[in-house]
Amino acid sequence: MKIIYIMGKSSSGKDTIYKKLKENLDVNTYVMYTTRPIRKGEIDGVTYHYITDEEMNKYINGKKEEKLIEYRTYQTVHGPWTYATIADNQFKSDKNMIMLGTLESYQKMKELFKNELIPIYIEVEDGIRLERALKREREQKEPKYEEMCRRFLADSKDFAEENLKKAGINKRFENIELEECLNEILEEIKSEIEK
């Protein structure tokens, strides 16, 4: 099994690319867990598994059957939000898989899956990302502009060049023209799967 691991800063278009890749590839999908509130247009069990803080703490404290691979808690302007990768039955298949995550979660996944991961790092110039983030927030019933800004700034630290190098991320896919970026990513995935 190969795991196609999509990552990038917020508003880089990774969610859109993830959806397009699912349409173009015969793969299983991995859905991460989070305690953050669901946004307009998101679907529980598809976008994330939305769980309570109490449920998340059971995973963190080892009181659930499934193994916690990694988790991180962000102190947002709306309180703490936790995201986690959990070794549930989603990994019990020989079929290739696609998943979204952070650079931090990618590094934890590398410890378990070593050569099975295909990293796909998507990047966009910061000004374009900020415009996209603002547009998305304006579409929400209750825009969370402060949280949007916090995430934007946090991404600069999380995806700093030294962190990318440490994680072994050498190839980047610039998402200015969606179809062109998607085609480059599909070529990369095909090449890596055939190795």
Image (cartoon, rainbow, N blue to C red):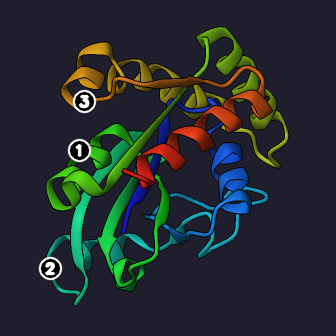
- Mark 1 vs mark 2: which is more N-terminal? 2
Mark 3 and mark 2: Cα distance apart in space: 30 Å
* Marks 3 and 1, how far apart at CA: 9 Å
Contact flag, marks 3 and 2 (Cβ < 8 Å): no
Q: Nearer the viewer, residue 181 or 44?
A: 181
Image coords of residue 11 (percent x, y): 64, 31
Q: Does label 3 or label 1 sit earlier along the sequence?
A: 1
Question: Rounded to the nearest whole Å, what is the CA distance between mark 1 and mark 2?
Answer: 21 Å
Q: Amino acid at mark 3?
A: Gly
Amino acid on which disc 1 is placed: Gln
Q: Which residue is mark 2?
A: 62
Q: Which residue is mark 1?
A: 107
Numbered disc 3: secondary structure: loop
How many C-alpha atoms fall within 10 Å of the one at disc 3: few (<14), some, or many (≥20)? few
Residue 63 against residue 70 in the figure, above or below: below
User: Which residue is at 53% across, 49% downward?
Assistant: 190
Query: What label does residue 179 carry, if any?
Result: none
Q: Residue at x 44, y 73 (%)?
A: 52
Is 157 located above or below residue 189 in the figure?
Answer: above
Foreground: 178 or 129?
A: 178
Left or right position of 154 against 64:
right
Query: Which label belongs to residue 168?
Result: 3
Quadrant placement of the N terminus? bottom left
* Amino acid type, callout 2: Gly
Residue at point 59%, 76% (across, down): 45
